[in-house]
Image: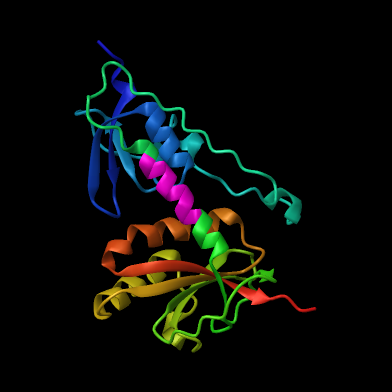
């Protein structure tokens, strides 16, 4: 009999979706790729109570953590990144078609295109990173999410549309509050809408990646494309 900890049921809380009998190593990969968050839950396959990933001592170690000593030097960002997909189904796994590599590639491409698809807009009023290669997008229907830093260096969120500044009630929000306001705008909007993220240049990458995952999960609600907002580099 196989170890029950090797096969897990995974519950993505935000989407209210359960994946059953997932190998432990695959769950660990999902966590490291940002597809599972702290509040998502797991349990041994078909038994026991649901436990938050952040409270599971075996899986919590795979959750990303911000490094306060991280340098802002661009050299690290320019290093070549190698992606390896080494998952092989075990003999006791189901004989279904393995879609995990395709999902992994899709997530990698999403992050790549978001990081390379940048727009120069100043509606959010946030000190975003500077770049020489970008384009101006003036779509008044585009929704933007701002991620600024407070006095303690913690992320604070806002939401607006087009190039207009945010309303007073749409500033100083938590991550959960800004996502609730985004869901309300997406339900009111008919058709597809583009979303851009305006993040402060000194915020850790994990903060932006987490928001990217949230936006990707909301694509069925009407998000057609995701951009990163930048500032035009001065000569």
Q: Is residue 108 magenta?
A: yes
- State the extent of the magenta-drawn residues as a range: 102-111
Quarter assignment of residue 219: bottom left
Residue 85: x and y in percent read 47, 32
Tell me: residue 133, above or below residue 44: below
The colour scheme applied to this rendered structure is rainbow
Q: Work out whether residue 215 or residue 6 is closer to the camera in this orientation and state it.
A: 215
Residue 158: x and y in percent read 48, 76
Instruction: Please state if 100 lies on the left or on the right of 207 as rendered.
Output: left
Q: Residue at x 33, y 19 (%)?
A: 90
Total count of labels: 0
Q: Residue at x 37, y 27 (%)?
A: 24
Quadrant where the image shows the N terminus = top left
Magenta part, dominant SS? helix
Q: Is residue 234 magenta?
A: no
Instruction: Please state if 160 lies on the left or on the right of 230 as rendered.
Output: left
Quadrant where the image shows the C terminus = bottom right
Q: Say whether residue 54 is visible.
A: no
Q: Residue at x 64, y 48 (%)?
A: 67
The single residue placed furthest to the left in the displayed view is: 46
Residue 48: x and y in percent read 23, 30
Tell me: residue 16, above or below residue 197: above
Q: Say whether residue 163 is visible.
A: yes
Q: Residue at x 41, y 39 (%)?
A: 30
Quarter assignment of residue 136: bottom right
Tell me: residue 102, above or below residue 73: above
The single residue placed furthest to the right in the displayed view is: 235
Q: Work out whether residue 213 or residue 41 is closer to the camera in this orientation and state it.
A: 213
């Amino acid at each position: 009999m196989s170890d029950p900890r090797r096969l897990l049921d995974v519950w993505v809380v935000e989407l209210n979706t359960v994946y059953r009998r997932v190998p432990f190593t695959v769950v660990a990969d999902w966590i490291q790729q940002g597809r599972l968050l702290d509040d998502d839950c797991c349990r041994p396959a078909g038994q026991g109570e649901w436990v938050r990933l952040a409270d599971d001592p075996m899986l919590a170690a795979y959750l990303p953590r911000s490094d306060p000593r991280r340098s802002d030097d661009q050299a690290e960002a320019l290093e070549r990144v190698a992606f390896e997909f080494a998952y092989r189904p075990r003999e006791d796994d189901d004989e279904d078609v393995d879609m995990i590599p395709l999902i992994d590639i899709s997530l990698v491409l999403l992050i790549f295109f978001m990081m390379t698809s940048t727009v120069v807009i100043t509606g959010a009023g946030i000190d975003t990173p500077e770049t020489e290669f970008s384009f101006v997008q003036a779509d008044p229907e585009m929704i933007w999410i701002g991620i600024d830093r407070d006095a303690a260096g913690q992320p604070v969120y806002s939401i607006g549309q087009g190039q207009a500044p945010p309303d007073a009630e749409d500033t100083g929000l938590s991550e959960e509050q800004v996502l609730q306001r985004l869901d309300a705008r997406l339900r009111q909007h008919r058709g597809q809408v583009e979303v851009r993220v305006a993040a402060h240049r000194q915020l850790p990458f994990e903060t932006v990646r987490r928001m990217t995952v949230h936006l990707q999960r909301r694509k069925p609600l009407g998000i057609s494309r995701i951009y990163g907002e930048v500032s035009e580099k001065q000569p």
